[in-house]
Amino acid sequence: MTATPMYADLVGSEDPLELLASTPDRIARLVRPWRPARWKASYAPGKWSGAQIVLHLAQDEVGWSNRVRMALSGSEYVVQPFDAAAWVERETPVDALAALEAYLALRKLNLGLYRGVGEEERSRPFRHPEVGEMSVDWILRTLAGHDLHHLKQLEKVRP
């Protein structure tokens, strides 16, 4: 049985592909005008800065889209877990605007892939050693909700 996508409550009945196309623009409009102090600020004590959140979004575009590509191009695919916090820590400090542009470019590229995936391929199961069974559709819904989750955090960032 496939696990419920993470952040499914944020996606609700909305089309994940539409959210994957629109939310990055919302994020970009919010953060592009930020001054350095705001990029360094966080939405809560001990949490990632605005720059780190955007870096994380760019990194997840790499990690999650790689999973989609691997699932679509082979059989018996087993997901390789990764530690998102370790990835962010490794690349901090970061050029926030470079991270934003990477996120936007990778999403645009990945949307071409995602839109070309048929219903049968979207629902074909593969395994994650920690989460259990998932599918491309699971990933798309998770990514769509993930964007919204971090958009809410970015809206709370104050210098």
Image (cartoon, helix red, strand yellow):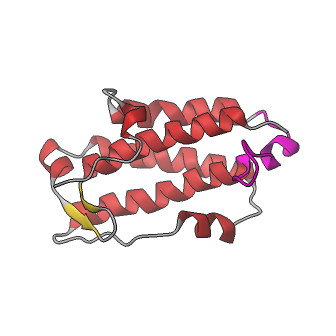
Q: Which residue is drawn at 87% across and 44% down?
A: 37
Furthest residue toward front: 45
Q: Nearer the viewer, residue 57 or 6?
A: 6
The magenta stretch is 33-50
Furthest residue toward left: 120
Q: Which of 83 and 25 is in front in this view?
A: 83
Position of 4 with respect to 7 (left or right) is left
Q: Quadrant of residue 16?
A: top left
Position of 152 with respect to 145 (left or right) is right
Predominant SS of the magenta segment: loop
Q: Which residue is drawn at 64% across and 63% down?
A: 88
Name the quadrant of the C terminus.
top right
Asked whether residue 32 is in view, the answer is yes
Q: Which residue is drawn at 26% across and 72% down?
A: 78
Q: Identify whether 58 is placed above or below 12.
A: below
Position of 155 with respect to 149 (left or right) is right
39 in magenta:
yes
